[in-house]
Image (tube, rainbow, N blue to C red):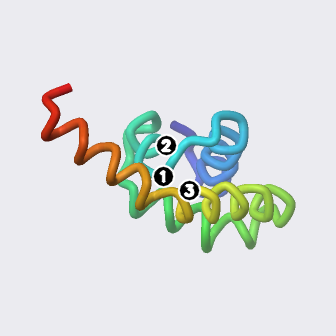
Amino acid sequence: MTDTIEERACELAVYMIETGATVRAAAKKFGISKSTVHKDLTCRLKQYNLGLYQQVRQILEHNKKERHIRGGIATKRKYKGD
């Protein structure tokens, strides 16, 4: 992980743009909490790099629209025994 908050926010943004990962997946990959990832991407990144922020915002909105579907799939797997 990088030393400064600015570098961390930019690294998280690039990772999410390249992979389309969720906030939870990014948090797990970088070993930080999901609330830190969310704060970095929604608040701090806007101050440091507006271009990256706008790209990440689209991914976050897309993930937000799909989260109920992912939850249903996870519940189905849980009770099906997969």
Identified by mark 1, the residue type is Val
Which label number is shown at residue 11? none
Instruction: Identify the mark nearer the N-term, 2 or 3.
Output: 2
Mark 2 vs 1: CB contact within 8 A: yes
Q: Residue at x 16, y 33 (%)?
A: 80
Q: Secondary structure at mark 3?
A: helix
Identified by mark 2, the residue type is Ala
19 with respect to 68 (left or right): right
Nearest the viewer among 71 and 15 is: 71
* Residue beneath disc 2: 26
Q: Residue at x 43, y 54 (%)?
A: 69
Identified by mark 3, the residue type is Asn
Q: Quadrant of the C terminus?
A: top left
The CA span between labels 1 and 3 is 9 Å
Mark 1 vs 3: CB contact within 8 A: yes
Residue 60 in the image, given as x and y percentages of width and height: 61, 60
Q: Secondary structure at mark 1?
A: helix
Q: In the displayed image of the protein, which residue is found farthest to the right? A: 51
In which quarter of the view is residue 31 placed? top left
Q: Mark 2 Cα within 10 Å, few/some/many (few <14, many 20+)? A: many
Image height of 14 relative to 39, above or below:
above
Residue 50 in the image, given as x and y percentages of width and height: 83, 66
* Residue beneath disc 3: 63
Image height of 76 relative to 55, above or below:
above
The CA span between labels 2 and 1 is 5 Å
The CA span between labels 2 and 3 is 13 Å
Image height of 44 relative to 76, above or below:
below
* Residue beneath disc 1: 23
8 with respect to 68 (left or right): right
**In this view, the mark in front (2 or 3):** 3
